[in-house]
Structure formats: C-alpha cells, structure tokens
Amino acid sequence: MSHPPVPIDQRWLHAVSGSAVAELDAWADEEPAGLLDAPVMFGLHSRSHPVGAEVHDLDGHEVTYGPRPSGSGLRGEVLLDAIAQRELTGRGGGHFPVAAKWRAALAAGGGGLVVANGAEGEPASVKDAALLQLRPHLVLDGLALAAEVLGTRHAVIWLHAGDLATQRSVSRALVERATRGDLGIEMRIAVGPDHYLTGESSSIVRGLEGGPALPYLARRPAAVAGVGGRPTVVHNVETLARVGLAARNGAADGALVTLVGPRSRVVYSASPLHTFGGLLEEAGATLDAFQAVLVGGYGGSWLPWPQAAHVPLSESSLRQVGASMGAGVVAPLPRAACGLTETSRLLDFLAASSARQCGPCVFGLPALADVFRRLATGRPSRGDLKALDRYAGEIKGRGACHHPDGAVRLARTALHCFADDVRRHATGRPCPGASGPVVLPVPEVT
C-alpha cells in the first residue's frame, strides 16, 4: 500500500472570502439531513444519508443556541477557566484536558493555528459526520472561540477526502457565515486521504506542512510546536461543539456515541449516567442477545456483556474496568457471532492501515494478525498462544504512534473476553459463531 506524498486537496485550502465564497457555494449544492439531539440513523456503508432529523442552518442555529459569545480578552480567560472547572476533555480518543492544551499553547506564545479534526478514521464511527452535517455551526462556534482565546486568526477544518457530504455541509456553513460577515476568523478547509491514520494529530500537522498525512516518527506536542513550528491546537469536532456549548453556559458533559448494529449505526447523545445496558434498552435491543461489547473503536477493548451491562459510559467508570470510550464507538456482539473472528478481521484491517514507518507497524502488526487469524479459523500452530503474548509485549509502547498499542489492546482483551472460545479454537474446535455472519464494518484498504 502506498501513501500519497502530498495528501491535501488544494481546492479546499483557501480562506472563505471574496471569490472563494462563490466557489464553495457552487460545491455546496446539496442539502444534508439529520439530527444531533436524537438518534440519527445511517446506512451501514454510508456516511452520507442520515435519516429522520433536522439540519441547523445559521438562522436555526442561532434560534436554538443564541449568538456566539466572544472569546477575546477577559471573556476568553473566563471561558478558559470554565472549561477547566468542567474538566472538558478531548472527544477524539485521547481525552486530554482541553484547558491544559490551551494553556500549553499560550505558554508557547499563542497564535499559530487551531484545527477542527473531522477526519473520522474509525470505520464504525459516524458521530463526527453527524455533528458536521447536522450542527456544523456549533463546531464552527467552538473553533472561532478557541482561536480567539489562543490569539490567532487562523483555523482549519480537516476532513477526509471521501466524505463529500460532510465537505458540502461545512462549506455551506462557511458560505452562510461569510455572506453574513460573521467570519472574524479565517477558516480554511483542508482534505486529507481516506486512511485510518489521517485524523491522528501529528498526521494532520505533517499533512498541513505539505508532507504525507502520517504520524511523525519523533513525537512532539503540536500545541507547543506544530505547523511551521508554531503552536497548533488540534481538537476533535465534538470537543469544539462542547466548547461552543460551554461558552453559552450550556451542558458540556456527556458524549456522542455511535451504537453499531447489524444493519445500521445510530448516534446517541449519552450522559455519564447512561450504562451500556441502558443505552441498548433505549435503542430497543434485547439485552440477553449479547455476549460482549467492543468499546472505544477498533483499537479499543472487548468487555464481557454481563460485566459491561451495568458500567456507566463515563471515562472514570470505564478506566476501572480497563477500557475507554476512545472514539465513542459502542459495538455489542450478538451471541450468534464469534468474537475471535471479528477480532481477526479488525487486526487484519489495523495491520493494513498502519503507517509502515517503524518496526512494530511493518513487522509486528502483520505477525500478530497472522497468528490471530490461525486461532480464529481453528487452525493454530503449536505455540501460537505464547506467540500472541510475545508479539503483544514486543509491540506495545514501541511504535512511532499509538496505532500498534490499539491493536495490542484489541487482541489482549479479546483473548480474555472470549477465553472459552480461545480454548475451543486452540484445539481445532471453532465455536458455532465462527461460521456465522460478520458484524463489524471493515472497509477495504488499498
């Protein structure tokens, strides 16, 4: 698999002003549909068609939320303190405190660049697409507020190249603001390649600097030294929407989650008091139909259903059971499916989606996926279980980015969660679900 050396689509890398408005308006000719505040249905293989909900244009946005407050001067200091008190964390997977990231950028001199990261790499997740298609102005409010607090007039919305519905929605929202004269911050759209790692923060920095959208081998905090060596604050779009709410004294707790079903994905706004069982009951599911749940995404953790059913969807509660909400994916596994087969498919995908820049990605992930595939098909070699443990130990913490760590987490939690099936498969007796239908959507990697 090759990666393009210059992944940014230059059609989108411009300010929304003057003639650019007409260019964007010509592109933004389709009206998206959907709703953030209620369940949003998406076709399993498409991010483009949310069903049964309402889109907020700029007028509807301001009727619902009111005009955007200022983030400049004293008001910015007040907002920063409020975000710190509310302990708002990032919603892209890392859950790093927002206030700490802003203060690090300010300590490094401020200015620089603020990036709204809408390049949703998790194949099962559609929460960011839902937010940008249905409530784009809430994200743009948060982006403008962050820029004002940090003392910069430069902001980027970073998207996947293949997500045309989201590109149209964001471009339309920018046109609305430019037409009304509401773009006090220079906002640009940049498009990276359709790749699992495109949304990783250092991949974004590298892509915006003109290189491949792949993680930097040498880690450096972008908030201190990012694009062009200047402070670059990268936030998931849900994080910025929460900033937009917090600035209006609105609720900034809870989280958007994508509930993955056999034929659809549903975006829910879940409070920290929601349990996994409660969430699925609201979705109309029969709770005894599940054996486990994958939490956080494809680099997340498997939890046995009897344990997970009563766990709240808060980060602190999940840490107690060795998991994290990560990218906000909740994927319950039916009893008729095979957790080892599903994990093997995901490991193959993660190995194919690696940056291939370091040993753990080039050699470790394919080796881990190969051994796990033999186990999943009931044809393991002698010593494969020990090899899985050895590979996991050799890979964890040694990659240039956290991608290999996610694959190790997925494999290790699967071996624990599906221990009974592991024993069956290891003796050549795959469980009944091994020949059943697959559950989790896995795209082809080219």
Image (cartoon, rainbow, N blue to C red):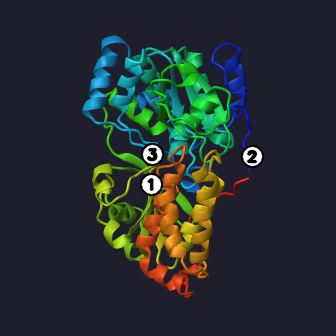
Residue at image location 54% in from the left, 77% down from the top: 383
Q: Nearer the viewer, residue 8 or 143?
A: 8
Closer-to-camera residue (74/322): 322
Q: Position of residue 385 (x, y in %)?
A: 50, 74
Q: Label 1 sits on what residue type?
A: Gly
Mark 1: few/some/many CA within 10 Å (<14, 14-19, 20+): many
Residue highlighted by disc 2: 2
Residues tagged 1 and 3 counted as in contact (Cβ below 8 A):
yes
Give the vertical position of 444 relative to 286 (above or below).
above
Q: Which residue is pictured at 57% across the width and 73% down the height?
A: 341
What residue type is disc 3 on?
Gly
Report the front residue among 147 and 132. 147
In the rendered structure, which disc, 2 or 3, sits on the residue that comes first in sequence?
A: 2
Q: Is residue 316 left or right of residue 35?
A: left
Comes first in the chain, label 1 or label 3: 3
Q: Which residue is mark 3?
A: 93
For label 3, the crowd category at 10 Å Cα-Cα, with few meaning under 14, some 14 to 19 and many 20 or more, is: some
